[in-house]
Image (tube, rainbow, N blue to C red):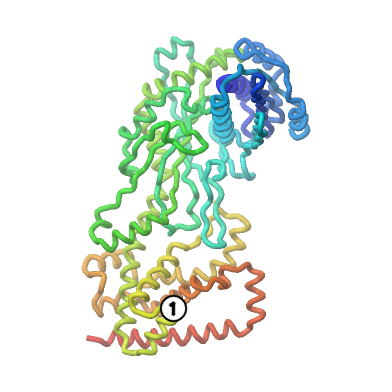
């Protein structure tokens, strides 16, 4: 069932690819399967719309005649489905019905599952085409549509329109609170490589020119939350034939599997990359090759047990990202004019693709390495920035705890405890750490390429509350990255009095005021930051003195912190 469907779709895609115009033209593709226990399964493949409109009648007749020798046609029994399909997409330009011999129920279920996966993979590189799958069995009727997603969330490579919708790849966009997420994947295009064909392929009749191109994406997109901890969990490779057919383990992939040991992963900032076995690959994409990436903490993070515990806690809520690498192939032969030659070339090319990769192994490795390095560049920069933040947080917390613990003002200490809703110094330390970590992790930064209307709306309500906390922490006037690391090198996590006074800038009192406010917001389930804009406006209208009271309280806390800093700096 699945193999015959591949043959029919290869025939259709070869016809479309021959015109080289399908990348921007929309349309529909429908695959209807009737698998009843009392009769052989019948499949109908139909295509309509502008994407296949230019197929010539002579080429279509030639293709159908050639296809009927391998896949004998039968009478179509899906007239109702075809009628609905033409109502939505227009006149049919291609239709083919064929039957499959009866098989066991288990094998039928396996075949149907493989067909669904195949259509899903096919839809990823035909984003302009809506692919409809309808399966009828004795007990159920299953309908599913694979679509390219939102308008604009597409990329083009080698005459293919690739969907960039994160949901199409089985991943969920990431967001914090009511802030928006970026549902798109941002592609990084690699170079095009001209390949040399091995002798056995030339003897098999392939005397044209072959080229390859790569494209990679890292998802889900975390650009809006640049401080949130992330880790690369796996790398998956999707390989497509010249007409856009997914390989799906139809041929050997020994070269791609060998990349686990032959690629310079250390240059990509990765270690312990392993190739997963085919039976261990999970998900709906049925990737051709999947590599698992294991996290390796650096020696710097191992040196202190306390820091190591923080790192483990951080990894526990880190967002797992997946690097998806597309490998597109292209084959042109000016001496092939008949559609049967195109289809035959596709089949031979698919069988010998692994040999082509081995024959051009050095160039292919370099191309893949370059593409992945470009894609992971921002990922590595974020991790370096995250390490600088992680090194600063313990110093800030230690300084604040030292000031509060050393204060001679019982009123000031009680005000700090009340603000953080704690009763002891140990609880205060834990609460401060949690609040500060939440501020750092939840930083929201609008990006132009991720920009949507909902992003702009959310910034006006949420960013105004977070900007103050982030700005004071991330850009203190006198706290540079070199200063942070020098302090870490020559001081313990409990700095001396002089070190504390140097580390805290002139705006540290405002920053700590924001930290205490952040703690209250986190603990108050009805805080305005978590309510819709309309409810926030109504709350302020009902309580006109809220802002004035808050400002007065802030001024009092600021004066207390200034006084404690003056007392602290005078100690010798």
Between 307 and 139, the residue placed more toward the observer is 139
**Which residue in the protein does label 1 denote?**
421
Q: How many marks?
A: 1
Between 27 and 192, the residue placed more toward the observer is 27
Instruction: Tell me the quarter of the image containing the C terminus.
Output: bottom left
- Residue 399 lies in quadrant: bottom left
SS for tag 1?
Answer: loop
Between 526 and 445, the residue placed more toward the observer is 526
Q: Is residue 490 left or right of residue 114?
A: left
Q: Is residue 281 visible?
A: yes
Q: Is residue 3 left or right of residue 200?
A: right
In the rendered image, residue 380, in percent from the top left (x then y), is placed at 38, 50
Q: Is residue 130 visible?
A: no
In the rendered image, residue 206, in percent from the top left (x then y), is placed at 48, 14
In the rendered image, residue 163, in percent from the top left (x then y), is placed at 57, 39
- Residue 164 lies in quadrant: top right
In the rendered image, residue 334, in percent from the top left (x then y), is placed at 55, 15
- Residue 153 lies in quadrant: top right
170 is higher (above) or lower (below) than 425: above
How packed mark 1 is, by other alpha carbons closer than 10 Å (few <14, some 14-19, many 20 or more), is some
319 is higher (above) or lower (below) than 562: above
Q: Is residue 417 left or right of residue 487?
A: right
Query: What residue sits 66% from the left and 70% below the top?
Result: 534
Query: What residue sits 37% from the left and 29% below the top?
Result: 363
Instruction: Tell me the quarter of the image containing the N terminus.
Output: top right
Query: What residue sits 54% from the left and 27% below the top?
Result: 106
């Amino acid at each position: 069932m699945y193999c015959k469907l591949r043959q029919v779709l290869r025939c259709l895609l070869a016809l479309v690819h021959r015109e080289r115009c399908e990348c921007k033209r929309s349309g529909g593709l429908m695959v209807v399967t009737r698998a009843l226990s009392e009769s052989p399964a019948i499949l109908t493949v139909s295509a309509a719309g502008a994407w296949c409109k230019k197929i010539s009648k002579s080429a279509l007749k030639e293709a159908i005649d050639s296809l009927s020798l391998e896949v004998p046609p039968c009478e179509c029994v899906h007239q109702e489905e075809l009628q609905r399909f033409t109502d939505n997409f227009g006149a049919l330009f291609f239709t083919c019905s064929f039957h499959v011999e009866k098989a066991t129920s288990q094998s039928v279920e396996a075949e149907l599952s493989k067909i669904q996966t195949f259509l899903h993979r096919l839809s990823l590189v035909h984003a302009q085409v809506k692919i409809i799958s309808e399966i009828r069995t004795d007990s159920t009727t299953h309908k599913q549509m694979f679509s390219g997603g939102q308008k604009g969330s597409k990329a083009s490579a080698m005459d293919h329109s690739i969907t960039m919708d994160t949901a199409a790849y089985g991943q969920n966009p990431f967001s914090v609170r009511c802030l928006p997420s970026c549902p798109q994947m941002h592609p990084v295009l690699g170079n095009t490589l001209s390949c040399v064909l091995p002798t056995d392929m030339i003897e098999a009749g392939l005397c044209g020119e072959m080229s390859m191109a790569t494209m990679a994406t890292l998802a889900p997109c975390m650009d809006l939350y640049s401080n949130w901890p992330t880790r690369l969990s796996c790398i998956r490779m999707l390989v497509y034939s010249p007409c856009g057919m997914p390989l799906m383990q139809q041929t050997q992939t020994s070269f791609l599997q060998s990349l686990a040991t032959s690629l310079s992963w250390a240059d990509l900032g990765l270690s312990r990359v392993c190739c997963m076995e085919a039976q261990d690959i999970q998900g709906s994409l049925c990737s051709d090759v999947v590599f698992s990436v294991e996290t390796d903490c650096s020696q710097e993070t191992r040196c202190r047990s306390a820091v190591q515990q923080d790192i483990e806690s951080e990894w526990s809520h880190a967002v797992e990202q997946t690097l998806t690498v597309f490998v597109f192939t292209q084959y042109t032969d000016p001496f092939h004019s008949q559609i049967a030659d195109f289809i035959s070339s596709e089949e031979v090319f698919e069988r010998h693709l692994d040999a082509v990769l081995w024959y051009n192994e050095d160039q292919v490795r370099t191309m893949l390495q370059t593409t992945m390095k470009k894609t992971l560049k921002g990922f590595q920069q974020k991790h370096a920035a995250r390490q600088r933040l992680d090194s600063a947080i313990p110093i800030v917390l230690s300084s604040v705890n030292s000031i509060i613990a050393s204060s001679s003002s019982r009123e000031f200490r009680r005000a700090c405890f009340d603000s953080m809703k704690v009763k002891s110094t140990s609880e205060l330390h834990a609460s401060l750490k949690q609040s500060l970590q939440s501020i750092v992790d939840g930083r929201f930064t609008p990006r132009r390429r991720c920009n949507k209307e909902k992003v702009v709306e959310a910034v006006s309500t949420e960013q105004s509350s977070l900007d103050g906390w982030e700005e004071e922490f991330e850009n203190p006037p006198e706290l540079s990255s070199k200063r942070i690391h020098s302090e870490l090198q020559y001081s313990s996590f409990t700095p001396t009095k002089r070190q504390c006074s140097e580390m805290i800038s002139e705006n540290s009192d405002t920053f700590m005021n924001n930290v205490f406010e952040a703690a209250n917001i986190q603990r108050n389930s009805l805080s305005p930051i978590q309510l819709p804009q309309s409810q926030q406006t109504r709350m302020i209208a009902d309580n006109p003195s809220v802002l004035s009271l808050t400002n007065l309280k802030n001024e009092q806390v600021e004066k207390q912190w200034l006084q404690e800093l003056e007392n602290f700096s005078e100690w010798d």
